Image (cartoon, grey):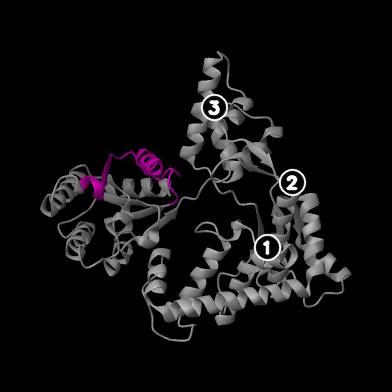
């Protein structure tokens, strides 16, 4: 993207293309610490143009509404004077969505969003100014800000993958690590952002500096949380959980199943690290009905169902956190009722994020009851599948305990030996 934008700016300056042909509005999204600000700065360097940093918080710090709007106009004017230029607006979601403003500050917040939209539209011209916004949650941004002609290009910056994390640490420390350290380093840094990895590198350098020697992989390991092996009762519970997801997903033919895994180590800190996962592929374009989504809910709740059926109790991992199985299932069930017209009523709600959906459930008892009924019904259905194919669940769990992973071919072979195919299938 950087090379394309740089070439477009050069072509615009030389009169080869009109400003309307340049990407003039971009939104960078991703978790905190992934490097959205650094990405914008690197883009400005790539394009060889100045960058002006702004945010709603900076504009609000100038004073009341009139001062805020003047500060906003001042930054846009400064960007126009420096054109070609990048105006970087951080924490774009802080503007909010006008559809969700509360009554007590609706007028103020609406005027702020309208003022920003006026500058994006550039009634008095915005040629030469590329506006880049950054956000942790693009769903919280007013849709008008993202419409075509404004900030209409979206670039998602995810957390670094396992190989990315190794590469980032090696780049920060200026040395290669022996491959024997890769597994422990990737597990210990699971879920780390670029900012987290930078802190690890600083701590490792500090330790080596105090010892008056070069940095070693051991310095990195000592700067990371302690790794604890996953064994015994916990390992069996993780295996049973993922085996449950596997059996319900394949029985309901919910997508193309690729495999399942559980981790061998976890971090000894207060952060939740995913203990395993089931990998199945769903088509981007498909005919989806209420049953499609209810199957998805059943698959999400299958880990809990498997624990209850096979172990007699459900552990806390299934419902802990906004990305947990239960959180995802609750979100889908609520959207079926309030947004998709796939519940027991047709009224459409604009609520879409978890906070808004929770508010709907708390304020409308009929929605709450319907969601509870769906979750309980699909939980019971998942338990029925687990009981029906419990021998297969046990075989898959045994393989996960022993090897840490199971493939689609292995699951098919296990099901065939038990005389369960069909209906067990690993391909949709």
Query: Residue most toward the top?
Result: 212
Left or right: 23 with respect to 166?
Answer: left
Upstream in sequence: badge 3 or badge 1:
3
Which residue is identified by label 1?
A: 313
In the rendered image, is residue 58 in sight? yes
Pointers 3 and 2 in contact (C-beta within 8 Å): no
Q: Secondary structure at mark 2?
A: loop
Closer to the camera, 124 or 336? 336
Q: Residue at x 43, y 64 (%)?
A: 354
In the foreground, 326 or 214:
326
Q: Residues within 10 Å of mark 2 (few under 14, many from 20)?
A: few
Where does the image place residue 54, in percent across and percent down from the top left?
Answer: 26, 45
* Residue designated by label 2: 231
On whether residue 98 falls in the magenta region, the answer is no
Q: Which mark is residue 10?
A: none
- In this picture, is 230 found above or below 308? above
| Residue density around tag 3, few if under 14, some if 14–19, many if 20 or more, within 10 Å | many
* x and y, in percent, of residue 366 in the image: 43, 81
Q: Which residue is mark 3?
A: 173
* Front disc: 3 or 2: 2
Residue 102 screen position, x and y as percent = 25, 66
Q: Quadrant location of residue 170?
A: top right
Dividing the picture into quadrants, the one containing residue 286 is: bottom right
User: Which residue occupies 87% across, 71% down?
Assistant: 418
Q: Residue lying farthest bottom?
A: 345
Pick whichever of labels 1 and 2 is earlier in the sequence: 2
| Residue 339 showing in the rendered view | no
Residue 257 place in picture, x, y as percent: 70, 65
Determine whether the residue tagged by mark 3 lies in a helix, strand or loop: helix
Disc 1 crowd, CA 10 A, few/some/many (<14, 14-19, 20+): few
Q: Which residues are magenta?
A: 30-59
User: Does the magenta-highlighted stretch encompass residue 34?
Assistant: yes
């Amino acid at each position: 993207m950087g090379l394309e934008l740089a070439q477009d700016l050069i072509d615009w300056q030389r009169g080869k293309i009109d400003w309307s042909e340049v990407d003039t509005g971009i939104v960078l999204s991703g978790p905190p610490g992934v490097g959205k600000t650094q990405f914008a700065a690197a883009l400005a360097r790539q394009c060889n143009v100045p960058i002006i940093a702004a945010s709603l918080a900076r504009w609000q710090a100038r004073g009341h509404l009139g001062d805020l709007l003047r500060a906003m106009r001042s930054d846009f004017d400064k960007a126009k004077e420096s054109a070609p230029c990048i105006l970087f607006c951080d924490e774009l979601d802080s503007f909010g969505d006008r559809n969700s403003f509360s009554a007590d500050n609706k007028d103020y917040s609406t005027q702020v969003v309208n003022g920003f939209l006026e500058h994006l539209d550039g009634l008095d011209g915005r040629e030469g100014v590329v506006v880049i916004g950054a956000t942790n949650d693009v769903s919280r941004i007013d849709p008008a800000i993202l419409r075509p002609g404004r900030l209409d290009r979206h670039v998602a910056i995810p957390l670094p993958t396992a190989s990315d994390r190794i590469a980032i640490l090696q780049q920060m420390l200026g040395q290669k690590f022996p491959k024997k350290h890769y597994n422990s380093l990737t597990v210990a840094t699971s879920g780390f952002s670029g900012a987290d990895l930078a802190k690890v590198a600083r701590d490792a350098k500090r330790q080596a500096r105090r010892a008056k020697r070069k940095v070693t992989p051991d310095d990195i390991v000592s700067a990371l949380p302690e790794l604890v092996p996953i064994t015994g009762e916990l390992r069996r519970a993780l295996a049973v959980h993922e085996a449950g997801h596997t059996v319900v997903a394949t029985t309901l033919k919910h997508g193309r199943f690729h495999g399942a895994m559980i981790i061998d180590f976890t971090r000894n800190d207060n952060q939740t690290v995913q203990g395993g996962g089931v990998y199945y592929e769903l088509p981007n374009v498909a005919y989806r009905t209420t049953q499609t989504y209810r199957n998805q809910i059943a698959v999400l709740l299958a880990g809990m169902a498997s624990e209850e059926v096979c172990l007699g109790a459900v552990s806390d991992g299934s419902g802990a956190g906004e990305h947990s199985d239960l959180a995802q299932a609750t979100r889908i069930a609520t959207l079926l009722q309030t947004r998709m017209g796939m519940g027991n009523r047709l009224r459409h709600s604009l609520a879409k994020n978890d906070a808004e959906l929770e508010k709907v459930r708390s304020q409308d008892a009929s929605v709450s009851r319907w969601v509870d009924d769906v979750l309980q019904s699909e939980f019971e259905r998942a338990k029925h599948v687990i009981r029906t194919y419990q021998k297969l669940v046990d075989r898959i769990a045994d393989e996960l305990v022993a090897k840490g992973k199971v493939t689609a071919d292995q699951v098919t072979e296990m099901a065939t030996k038990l005389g369960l195919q069909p209906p067990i299938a690993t391909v949709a």
